[in-house]
Amino acid sequence: MAGEALIPVYRRAPVALVRGEGVHLWDDQGRHYWDFISGIGVNSLGHQHPRVRAAILASLELLHTSNLYRNLPQEQLAARLSELTGGMLAFFANSGTEANEAAIKLARRWGREQGRTTIVSFLGGFHGRTLGSLAATGEAPYREPFEPLPPGFRHVPYDDLKALEAALAAEPVAAVLVEAIQGEAGVVVPSPGFLRQVAELTHRAGALLMVDEVQTGMGRTGAWFAYQHEAVQPDVITLAKGLGGGLPVGAMLARPEVAQTLRPGDHGSTFGGNLMAMRVGLAVVDWLQEEGLAHVRAMEPHMAQALRQLVARHPDRVEGVRGRGLMWGLVLREPSAPFASRALELGLLINAAGGRVLRFLPPLVVDEAAIAAMAEILDQVLAQ
């Protein structure tokens, strides 16, 4: 049986993808697919992008040296991200989970001297699957099989400022960890002004504001980071997914006065910030700066219109649509997993999230023709 030597922690579709180009994928049988999930938001520049290929080829001369020595591409990418965030310092890891773990440790280290160790996060949020990041995740199905989890976490309803205010008043809080848009919950977009008010309440309470931009960052919503839509200044930002253009990468960014709480030996990562991932990260930043952000903003109305037309055509099956930039969710009136499976059969890669939501995270290089093809396939799926 295929994959019989693998631990069954994934429900894999019976498709083996072997080749890609742009927003196109092909399986081992030569069948074509439109990629509208991009490896769950990872392949930000699509497949076989010339900038990514060039960065990978440039890395073949030296693959790994460890963080015991200077790493020039790592220093360069940290400097670029610092420019984009008003002077934040960077720690590089290999995933969003690792980035959030680093943020949790930083918050605990920073708050410990002040008697603040509690971290507040939001129900519906998802921050990773290691014990620390899982403790910050508020959803019981992820948490319960692995309890007891590390203590010191409090969860409040998303988009509920009164609940957050009460949590901040109940005890000394080190940090508030929040997603600008909740991705795994089904692309849940909060009320306008929510993130700005979260920042105000958090800083008024003397706590750190930590924004999880693992899924929303690096141009996904049409800005460098989703928090920028509300002119918020976080104390800590976590990144991953699109930053690596297809390679494993994670980053924790922090204001210098907060970042310097961590001292040599407090944290580390053997593979974090490796030469290849850093070179690809620089290529992603270059593309976004030169043309990518403008392209995402240009494609946003086409994506929104295509999905809203599906709502209008299938009101019996589709409840609504929500999203921003190139991150969208189509809210169904019934479980979404069968619809995602049928779309795969017709040559479209999307995925189910939040129970009744179809999630769309296409490569940021997606064009109008691909969006039209996606809508045509999905129209067939919803009509059946």
Image: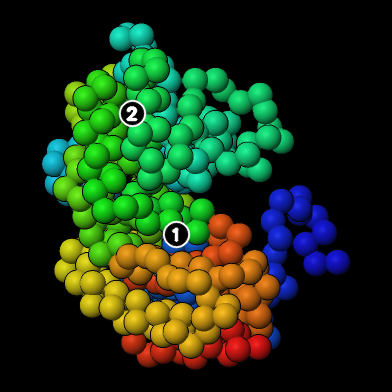
Q: Report the front residue among 319 and 240.
A: 319
Q: CA distance from mark 2 to mark 1?
A: 24 Å
Query: Neighbour class for label 2 at 10 Å: few (<14), some, many (≥20)?
Result: some
Q: Residue at x 26, y 53 (%)?
A: 192
The image's mark for residue 165 is 2
Q: Secondary structure at mark 2?
A: helix
Residue 243 vs residue 361: left or right?
Answer: left
The image's mark for residue 187 is 1
Q: Report the front residue among 208 and 347.
A: 208
Residue 358 visible:
no
Q: Residue at x 45, y 71 (%)?
A: 320
Rendering coords of residue 343 (x, y %): 60, 80
Rendering coords of residue 212 (x, y %): 37, 43
The quarter in which the N terminus is drawn is bottom right
- Amino acid residing under circle 2: Glu
Residue 83 visible:
yes
Residue 363 vs residue 138: left or right?
Answer: left
Rendering coords of residue 56 (x, y %): 38, 62
Q: Report the front residue among 342 and 8.
A: 342
Q: Residue at x 60, y 89 (%)?
A: 383
Q: Report the front residue among 11 and 144.
A: 144
Check the image and report above or below for 52 versus 373: above
- Amino acid residing under circle 1: Val
Q: Nearer the viewer, mark 2 or mark 1?
A: 2
Rendering coords of residue 371 (x, y %): 40, 84
The quarter in which the C terminus is drawn is bottom right
Q: Residue at x 43, y 20 (%)?
A: 118
Q: Secondary structure at mark 1?
A: loop
Q: Earlier in the sequence, mark 2 or mark 1?
A: 2
Residue 51 vs residue 341: left or right?
Answer: left
Residue 239 vs residue 27: left or right?
Answer: left
